[in-house]
Image (cartoon, rainbow, N blue to C red):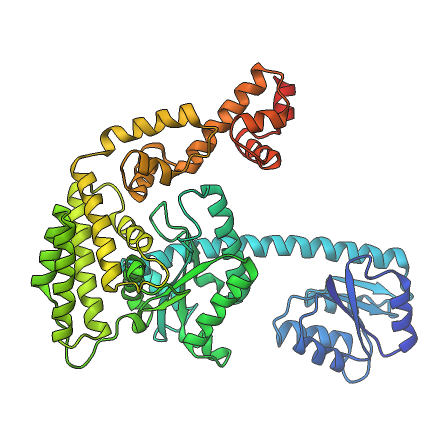
Amino acid sequence: MLEVLLVDDEPFILQGLQLLIDWEKEGYHITTASNGGEALEIIKERPVDLIIADIKMPVMTGLELLKALRSDLKSDTYFVILSGFAEFSYAQEALRYDCTDYILKPVEKDQLMEILSKVSALNSEKTHHRQDVLKKEKAYMERVLMRLLSGKYDVNDIEYISDKTSMDDEKCYVEIQLDDLMVTDETLDEDKKAQLAKVYSAALDYLKDDAIFCIRDISDSEQVFDIGFIYSESMGKRLQMTSKEYLNDFLDYLIANTNLPLTMLIGKNVSGIRNISKSYGTANMLHSLQGFREKKNIYFYEEEYKVGETGLIICKKELDALIAAIERGEHVEIRKCVDDFYEEMQKTGVTGSTMNLNINYLLFQLIHLASELDSEVNQEEILRIISESTSEEGISRGGKTHLCRMAYAYGEYISQLRKNVSRGVLGDVEEEIKKNYASNLTLKDLSEKYFVNSAYLGQLFRKKYGCSFKDYLNKKRIEEAARLLRKTDMKIYEVAEAVGYKDSDYFVNKFIEAMGCTPTKYKKNI
């Protein structure tokens, strides 16, 4: 609905204008004022799309209101002068101040309808133009932000962004991800993209004018579906909230409005936009190490990495021995090394910061070890998945039992890499899908059957086929469904069951996505 303000000092004229047409049906909501001064106060309080004002009124005339609107308020609100005077000089002066139209009393219905149609058309054109400008500005802003996050910005980027935010305000990088435990490789990529689009839309609604600092699909990993956001301390202050309160409220809003499980990672606070790449780097560290932190919806870098005054100690001897045991896959030796590590930590007076530093050293060394055997997949992601999959309810993440389980599983993974199990396993899996595509195949079941880590198998699949295992399986099923529709007289539900879909409606939706039409239309066209 467009907001229209009717201004006239004669009550019967205002009443006549209100009754002349069905304003709501034409897409307008009415407010009235008895003179230009009263109208100006209304406009200052809330936006108005169209003003129809009498030219001659007490306190402030229609022309004076128009001048104030254009000169003082810098408003481009549509303005129609209403007058009983036919002198051309009035119209001339009104047109000088960008008056939309000029009509004489008494107002006729057709004349008023014509003006409303004109205003609606102009408003639609203005809205489209504004959306186009905002879209281009947002796209450019995203490129500037990406350069800032990478630390590869130039003076032009700084000049551009200085108009959008306080340069020296304390800031941090915020990562918002679909929860990895709920969104697995078994979920179709299209479904993940749709979920992320839902989260992004909710984020823009919450951020309002600050939405220009929000970027979708910021990660360069095909497996991470995320949104990046640069938070400034002033955003919270405007709402009289601390940074922590604002970000918690932001996350609660996203979860409530999408009904999706989400994780938020808050990078280190830095002084000014020029240092935002440092905050971005610390948020990425949080992502890599989630598997060794207690499961939460939101992680703050400052809370996860608290450094004590006494300094930090790395138990390098014990950890190097543990890494060697993991590399050899010796379970008994792994258990002994974990015990030795925790015993040494107790001697040094373990703190959260010291434990984190030691765990970080261990994880980075393991990633390096795996990368030497296969550098083409995301080893950080595989380590995190292994770490999370070996953590169960009641077992503290990063505790002794969890560390042992993770080390056993990672040792087996290293052994698989060394034997180059990927060489033939993809061919075996592809053959399995060809034969049993209608069965309830899962990546986990296939990884157990062919003795390969499921996270690694998922990445191998993406590397070779350019899609997830689930997408590949779905593609094979649709291809076979299309063949059955071409070659047989089977009914749609029979075809769905034959290729592995228990839900016919779901099958139809997936068929439309892949083939661009319903199974019925496809069969008819053939």
- Give residue 60's quadrant in the image: bottom right
Residue 83's place in the image compared with 184, above or below, is below
Image quarter in which the C terminus is found? top right
| Residue 65 relative to residue 462: left or right | right
Image quarter in which the N terminus is found? bottom right
Residue 287 place in picture, x, y as percent? 32, 59
Q: Residue furthest top?
A: 487
Q: Residue furthest front?
A: 332
Residue 18 place in picture, x, y as percent? 87, 67
- The residue nearer to you, when weighing 20 against 349, is 349
- The residue nearer to you, when weighing 30 against 439, is 439
- Give residue 107's quadrant in the image: bottom right
Going 31% across and 69% down the picture, which residue do you hit? 301
Residue 271 visible, this angle? no
Residue 125's place in the image compared with 5, above or below, is above
| Residue 333 relative to residue 81: left or right | left
Going 12% across and 54% down the picture, which residue do you hit? 333
Residue 214's place in the image compared with 447, above or below, is below
Residue 90's place in the image compared with 322, above or below, is below
- The residue nearer to you, when weighing 410 against 479, is 410
Going 60% across and 25% down the picture, which residue do you hit? 494
Going 48% across and 52% down the picture, which residue do you hit? 196
Residue 105 place in picture, x, y as percent? 89, 67
Residue 394 place in picture, x, y as percent? 35, 64
| Residue 288 relative to residue 341: left or right | right
